Image: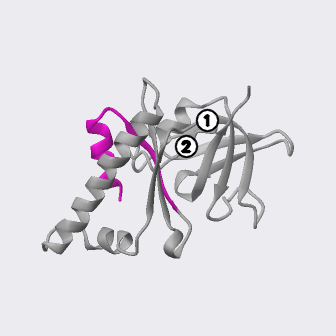
Amino acid sequence: MEAAIEPVCADMGYEALLIEWSGSGQRRVLRVFLDSPKGVTIADCTRMGRLIGNSLDAAEAAVEAGEGNPALAALLAPGYTLEVSSPGVDRPLAKKRHFTAQVGGRVKLKTWESPAAADADERSFNGRLVAVHDDDAAPEDQRRGTVVVHDPERDRTIPIPLPLIRRANLVWEG
């Protein structure tokens, strides 16, 4: 999915901050959150929605022509609604550099499973982002590493590996 979306965004001066699916059946929604140093307007989202949609259509057509990624075509085939948005004040955090830029800020995290330092069934975390560490085996990989969150309510600090994070958002402190 990222391979069909991220290059189009980068070519137009945006970062695909987060790409996610929600819903099911005929109500599936593909959400793409864009970011840019200049900010993201509604007009930007509209224009990029058309370009991203065209890119996804081209990826599906490539598979029909015997090229491209069949897994992507299978994912897109049941139909979906494409939504393109700016990150907003509760901006999503998905890659190591996103977390690094927000060290010191408050975050809300949901994980696929409990991290080793947490209670056995715990999958939701709130607190202040205090550090981000590289994965020694792949220090350049933006999807690997560990974020460290301090939970002031329980007075604990929890390291959470990036691959365990299902969803993370900055908590606005206005």
Residue 13: say if magenta: yes
Q: Name which residue type carries label 1.
A: Ala
Which residue in the protein does label 2 denote?
93
Q: Is residue 30 visible?
A: yes
Marks 2 and 1: in contact by CB < 8 Å? no
Question: Measured from the top left, where is residue 160 in percent x and y?
Answer: 62, 51
Tell which residue pokes out farthest to the top in this image: 38
Question: Measured from the top left, where is residue 143 in percent x and y?
Answer: 45, 50
Quadrant assignment for the C terminus: top right
Residue 64 sits above or below residue 166 on the image: below
Magenta range: 1-21
Question: Measured from the top left, where is residue 97 in percent x and y?
Answer: 47, 36
N-term mark: 1 or 2: 2
Residue 10 sits above or below residue 58 on the image: above
Q: Name which residue type carries label 2.
A: Leu
Residue 125 sits above or below residue 68 on the image: above
Residue 38 sits above or below residue 98 on the image: above
Crowding at dot 1, Cα within 10 Å, few <14 / some 14-19 / many 20+, comes out as some
Q: Secondary structure at mark 2?
A: loop
In the image, 78 versus 96, the foreground residue is 78
Q: Secondary structure at mark 1?
A: strand
- Residue at 27% from the left image edge and 61% from the top image edge: 57
Quadrant assignment for the N terminus: bottom left
Q: Is residue 135 visible?
A: no
- Residue at 46% from the left image edge and 31% from the top image edge: 41
Which residue in the protein does label 1 denote?
131
Residue 50: say if magenta: no
